[in-house]
Image: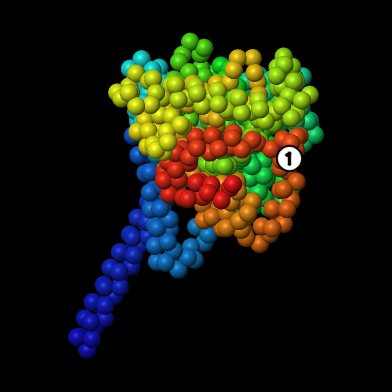
Amino acid sequence: MKPEIKRSCHSKKLNYRHLFLALAFLTTCSTLILWFEEISNHLSNIDLRQLPQNEMSDTLFTNFEHLQLIRTDIRTITKSETGGNREGQSDRHKHEIQISSQKNQQSKEDDHFSEGKYISLVKNPQQYTLSNTLKNIDKCMSKSNLMSPALLEIARENAKWFMEQYGRVISSQYLDGYVNYCWNTNYEVTLNGDYFEGHIGEYHFKNKPPLWFEQRMKASIKKDFKGKFSSSTVCLPNIYLLGFAKCGTTFFQCFLSKILNGDKKAQAIKEPYFWTPFDYKIHQPNSSNIGGHYVPMFLKGFKENVSTQERRELASIDATPITVLRWPRFTSEEPELTNYCLLPSALPELFPQSKYLVIMREPVSMMYSAFWWSLYHPPKTDKLSQYVKSNLTKGREIFHQQSVYMITQFLKCINSHQTVRTAENCTLLDIEGNFSACISNRKHLLPECVQNITIKEGQHIEAVIFKGIYYVYVQKWLQTVPRERIFFTAMERLTEHTHSVAKELSNFFGKVSQDEVERIKQKCRKKFNKNPINYTSSSLTIKESTKTILQKFFQPFNRMLSELLEDEQFLWRQKW
C-alpha cells in the first residue's frame, strides 16, 4: 500500500513541475512578444528613407527585417504550444486586424494613388554610391582617350554635382513589386497658366514645359486631372530606348510598349529629352525640374481603370533616341567632351534595375533617310534646304558633297592627331584595302574625331556620318553598363523577323507574350515616321558612287560593332 502512495505522490510532483515549466515558458514567450512588438512598432514609425546613407542606417534596416522574422517565429512557436486558443490573444489579434483595415481604408480614401506605401521597401545598396559613379567616369574617360587631368577633374566635379542634385529627390529605397522605379513622397503639381507648379518632397518647382511637350502636357493635366494632381507615390521609368534616330525608334517604341503593356495606354513617352537636351544648349541638372518637367510626362498611367497589381506592372518607357549619342553640357565654358561619360556612368546608379534598348539601321540608309527628313525640319534661315526642296533632283548631289566633306574632316583628324606616331595615313583610296586595319589601330581616337565631324556652316541639311558610327557610342555605354542590361537589335531584323525579336525581348524582360505579335506589328506600322519625300523613286535614289564611298567608310566600324556585340546582323551584309 505504501509503495503505491509514494509512486502517486512522486507522480503529482512531476506533474506540478511540468506545469510550472510550461507556465514559465508561456510567460517568457508572452513577454518577448510584447517586447518585440514595442520595439518593432517604434521602428515602424521611423522613416527609413530619411536616414543618412551610411553603415548605421544599413544595419538598422537589416536588423529591422530580422526583428520581423524573429517576431513571426515566436508567434508560431507560441501558437503551436498553446493550440492557438488563448482568448485574450485572439481578441487582441482581431482588434489589430480591425484597426489595420480601418487605417488602410481611410488611407485609400484620402489618396487613391498611395497603394505603394503598403509595399515593402527594397534597400538599394548601390544607390547614390558616388564612388561607383566616379569609378565609372574614370574607366570610361580612360577607354575613350579623354584623360587630360584638367578635363577629368571637371568631369568628376560635374558627376558629383549631378548625383547630388538628383539624389536629393530620387529616393534611395524603391517600392518592391513595381516595374517602374517608384518611391513614397508627397508630390503635387498644378497647371498655373503656362507653368507647372508644385513640390516633390520638400523641393518646390515652377517649370514651363518644353516646347515640344507643352500643349500635350497641358491638355493631359486639364483633361485627366482637372488641372491638379497629387500623390504619395512617384514613379520614373526603368526602361530607356537610347537610340538611334531614323532607325525605326517610333515603331520600336510602339511595339515594345504594346508587347509589355498590351492595349492599356502605356506611359511610353517619345522624346522627352530630359537627360539629354534636344540640341547642345546648356542643360544644368536641378533637383526640382524632375517634378515639373519629367514626372508629369508619365502621369497618364495613374488614370487607367486597372487594378492595383496591373498598375504596378504598367511599364513606363523613356524613348529619347539621342540619349546614346549626346550628353548634357552644364556650362558654356567647359570643353565639349567633359560630360561624355556622365549618363552611362550615373543613370545605372540612380536606377539600379533600369534596362536599356538600342536599335540600329544600316548606316548608309539611316544617313540618306535623315538627309531627306531634315529638309522639312530646317531653320527658316536655311537657304540650302529651301533650295533643295525647290529642286529635289539636286538633293542626290548635295548629299554626295556633304558626305565627302565630312569624311574628309574625319580623316584629317584621325591622321593628324598628336598621338599618331606614323606617317601612314588612313585613306579610302588605299588599293590594298588597309583602311579597316588603319582605323582599328587608331580607334582610341574615335570619340574625339567623331565629334569633329560637322556640316558646313550655315547648312542645316543633315548628312550626319557621325550618327552612323554606332560602335563609338555602343562601346562607351558597355564600358559601364553590364551587357545583360542592354538589348540590341537592327531595324531590318525587327521588321523582317518580328517574332524572333519578340522572343528575345521575352528573355530580356521575362514577361513578354507571343500571342498577338503579328497584330501588334501591323498596328505599330501605322506609327512609322514616313518620310515626307519619297526618296526611293528613281530620280531621287542615292547615287551609286556615294553609296560605294559610304559603304567602304562604314565597313570597319560595322565590323568592330559586330565583334563587340558578337552578332553578325550588324555587318548588314544582305542590305544592298
Q: Residue furthest left?
A: 3
Report x, y in % for residue 400. 61, 28
Between 231 and 252, the residue placed more toward the observer is 252
Residue 83, how many percent across, how many down? 45, 68
Residue at the spot 36% in from the left edge and 15% down from the top edge: 150
Give the side of residue 180 with respect to residue 478, left or right: right
499, 111: nearer the viewer: 499
The answer, for residue 147, to whether it is visible in the render is: yes
Q: Amino acid at mark 1?
A: Ser
Residue 132: name its quadrant.
top left
Q: Is residue 379 above or below residue 290?
A: above
Seen from this angle, which residue lies furthest front?
431
Residue at the location (19% across, 86% down)? 3
Q: Is residue 128 above or below residue 103?
A: above
Position of 539 with respect to 99 (left or right) is right
- The picture places residue 41, in percent across and down from the top left corner, at 47, 42
Tell me the crowding category of disc 1: few under 14, some 14 to 19, or many 20 or more residues within 10 angstroms, Cα based. few
Q: Nearer the viewer, residue 499 or 241?
A: 499
Is residue 26 shown above or below 327?
Answer: below
> How many badges with numbers are in the image?
1
SS for callout 1? loop
Q: Which residue is mark 1?
A: 538
Viewer can see residue 94: no
Q: Position of residue 486 (x, y in %)?
A: 49, 44
Specify the farthest residue to the bottom. 1
Q: Residue at x 28, y 68 (%)?
A: 17
Image quarter in which the N terminus is found: bottom left
Quarter of the figure with residue 422: top left
Of residue 63 and residue 14, the one placed in the foreground of this image is: 63
